[in-house]
Amino acid sequence: MGAQEKDLGTAWEYQGCVIPKDLYYDIENQVWVRVNEDGTVTLGLTDVGQTRAGRLLHIRVKSLGTKVKKGKPVATLESGKWAGPVPALVEGEIVDINPKVVEDPNYINIDPYGDAWIVKIKPSSEETLKRDLSELVSGEKAYEEMKKHIDEWDIVCMRCV
């Protein structure tokens, strides 16, 4: 590993950007998903995504019970320099919305992988979940693709507090 990369055990760090090993990623949209023990999935913005967006000022989240198709927005985020959708990475129903993030979207800039998740989705079925996850990247492949993205966009991650 080069000087700007570290293996932190449960995550990698490259150019200051943390990439947890246990998540699935949509590199293009910089969104992550974690499969929970209860069968739901948690969705949030990556460290790279929050860095590129800058300090997040507003969020609009679809309401509880909304059925979402993969790729369709579950939320819209706005910063001083960017506005854009947060796509669902799995098809299903929104079963939980993070009140901390709704109250203060800047929380995503501080803790993108911890308490600053955006929504939890109950997948439509095990089959659709398997299909949707197979279209994302995880593990070593996610790390390599994230490094390419970081290099291409010349990103050094920082947390806006």
Image (cartoon, rainbow, N blue to C red):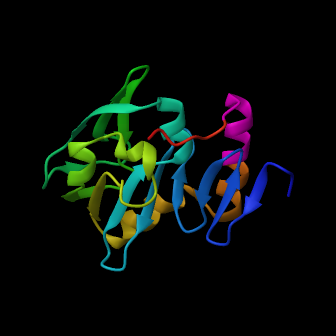
- Name the one closer to the observer, 125 or 109: 109
Q: In this view, does 61 lie to the left or right of 134?
A: left
Residue 110 % position (x, y): 44, 47
Quadrant assignment, res 104: top left
Q: Measured along the vertical axis of the image, is residue 137 above or below residue 154?
A: below
The reply to whether the magenta stretch includes residue 88 is no
User: Is residue 29 at least partly visible in the picture?
Assistant: no
Q: In the rendered image, which quarter contains the C terminus?
A: top left
Q: Farthest residue in the top direction?
A: 81
Please name the residue shown 20% across and 53% down the image: 99
- Name the one closer to the observer, 80 or 65: 80
Q: In the rendered image, which quarter contains the N terminus?
A: bottom right
Q: How many labels does the image show?
A: 0
Q: In this view, does 124 lie to the left or right of 48?
A: left
Residue 61 % position (x, y): 22, 42
> Where are the magenta residues, as a range?
146-155
Please name the residue shown 47% across and 53% down the image: 32
